[in-house]
């Protein structure tokens, strides 16, 4: 099975890039640089979802998180001018670097433990060939439509509030 090796290699590669990008995201002091690393994490997670036959979730990961939410976040950050001066370092001192190294080693140990376990080819709750979109969209557009819309209005109000607060300062 020649595709098995390539599939497994790409799965671990995307997982490793996602974990490394998340670690870099957490250690950035500049909000714009951190947001770009988070976009990289979202793309890697999307690739992992697609490799696990969850194409809908992978596409939503890119469209909603890496696209819309990150654009809104960067818009608010740049609107409020939260950037630090160029002389500010991304990582403070040796203590933070040692802590980041220990966290990275712990994540690597978790990856090695999971890599030794055998995962089933089919998930018991979702046989191969069934669509994941119906169980996701049915409750979203019927049962939870009102909370979904209220959340979007609250996010809009938060952005408008941030703009008003930024205007008052200047």
Image: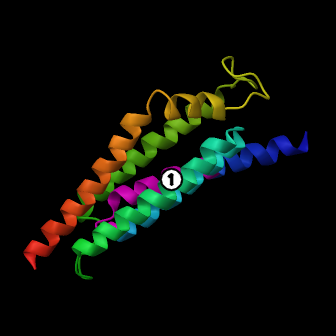
Q: Tell whether 62 sits left or right of 13.
A: left
Task: Give 24 or 54, whichever is nearer the viewer.
Answer: 54
Instruction: Determine if the magenta segment contains residue 15.
Output: yes
Examine the residues drawn in magenta and state their main secondary structure.
helix
Instruction: State which region is magenta.
Output: 14-31
Q: Could you say whether the residue bearing mark 1 is in a helix, strand or loop?
A: helix
In what quadrant of the picture does the C terminus appear?
bottom left
- Quadrant of res 128: top right
Instruction: Determine if the magenta segment contains residue 101.
Output: no
- Quadrant of res 138: top right
* Residue at 44% over, 35% down: 145
Residue 99: x percent and y percent? 31, 50
Residue 90: x percent and y percent? 30, 69
Q: Tell whether 36 sits left or right of 164.
A: right
Q: Is residue 127 visible?
A: yes
Q: Tell whether 6 sits left or right of 79.
A: right
Question: Compared with residue 28, is residue 139 higher up or lower down, i.e. above or below?
Answer: above
Question: Compared with residue 24, is residue 81 higher up or lower down, i.e. above or below?
Answer: below
In what quadrant of the picture does the N terminus appear?
top right
* Residue at 16% over, 67% down: 164
Q: Residues within 10 Å of mark 1 (few under 14, many from 20)?
A: few
Residue most extreme to the bottom = 86
* Residue at 27% over, 60% down: 159
Task: Give 7 or 42, whichever is nearer the viewer.
Answer: 42
The residue beneath circle 1 is 64
Residue most extreme to the left = 169
């Amino acid at each position: 099975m020649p595709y098995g090796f390539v599939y497994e290699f790409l799965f671990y590669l995307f997982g490793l890039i996602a974990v490394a990008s998340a670690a870099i995201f957490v250690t950035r002091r500049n909000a714009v640089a951190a947001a770009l690393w988070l976009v990289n994490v979202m793309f890697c997670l999307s690739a992992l979802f697609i490799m696990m036959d969850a194409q809908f979730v992978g596409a939503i990961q890119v469209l909603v998180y890496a696209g819309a939410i990150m654009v809104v976040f960067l818009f608010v950050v740049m609107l409020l001018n939260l950037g630090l001066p160029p002389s500010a370092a991304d990582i403070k001192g040796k203590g933070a670097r040692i802590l980041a190294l220990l966290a990275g080693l712990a994540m690597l140990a978790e990856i090695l433990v999971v890599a030794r376990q055998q995962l089933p080819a089919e998930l018991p709750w979702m046989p191969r060939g069934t669509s994941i979109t119906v169980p996701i969209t049915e409750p979203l557009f019927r049962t939870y439509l009102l909370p979904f819309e209220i959340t979007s209005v609250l996010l809009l109000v938060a952005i408008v509030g941030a703009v008003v607060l930024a205007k008052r300062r200047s």
